[in-house]
Image (cartoon, grey):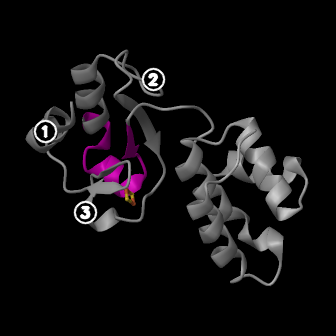
Amino acid sequence: MLEFSNETLAKFKTTLAQYPEKEAALLPTLWLAQYEFGYLSIEAMEYVAKLLDIPPSRVYSVASFYTMYKKEPTGKYLVQICRTLSCQLRGAEQVTDIICSKLKVNLGQTTPDNNFTIMEVECLGSCGTAPMMQINDDYYENLTKSKVNQIIDSLA
Ligand code: FES
């Protein structure tokens, strides 16, 4: 059975103390679960539901709504390319094409070595530095063809 480590459990308790009711802590608790377990499996979401005393269906629906929650296992590097307007106008599609062709995968797929998963996502709140992408916790901004190649090479 899945359970938070003592360290994550302590973070969960600190988080919980900041909210007037347990359910309000659902989003940050899902983050903790994602960090702890790598992605939000059904079992992980059921665990979160239990921690917060809410129905699992509530957790599934919230986790499904937000693209930042991973419902499937991903590669070591989760590459999220912003496809919203500013990024789109400044070459997001090219960024996706470069990465997919370099790694020989399609959007939504993981490379056979399990190193990269490539996704397009909605606005990541860095429109002024479009086009941009997020890889794990880091933002890569003002992307150009050569920058994209360098970034992927450095991680491969
Ligand atoms: S449109 Fe790409 S970060 Fe906002």
105 left or right of 36 in image: left
Q: Quadrant of the C terminus?
A: top left
Frontmost residue, 69 versus 146? 69
The mark found on residue 145 in the picture is: 1
Q: Residue at x 82, y 54 (%)?
A: 49
Frontmost residue, 75 versus 68? 75
Q: Earlier in the sequence, mark 1 or mark 2?
A: 2
Q: Which residue is mark 3?
A: 129
Q: What is the secondary structure assignment of the residue under circle 2?
A: loop
Badge 1 amino acid: Lys
**Residue 62, magenta (yes or no):** no
Question: Can you tell which quarter of the image residue 126 is in?
Answer: bottom left
Badge 2 amino acid: Gln
98 left or right of 52 in image: left
- Region of the chain picked out in magenta, as a range: 77-94
**93 shown above or below 124:** above
Q: Which residue is mark 2?
A: 109
Q: Is mark 3 within 8 Å of ligand 1?
A: yes
Frontmost residue, 112 versus 51? 51
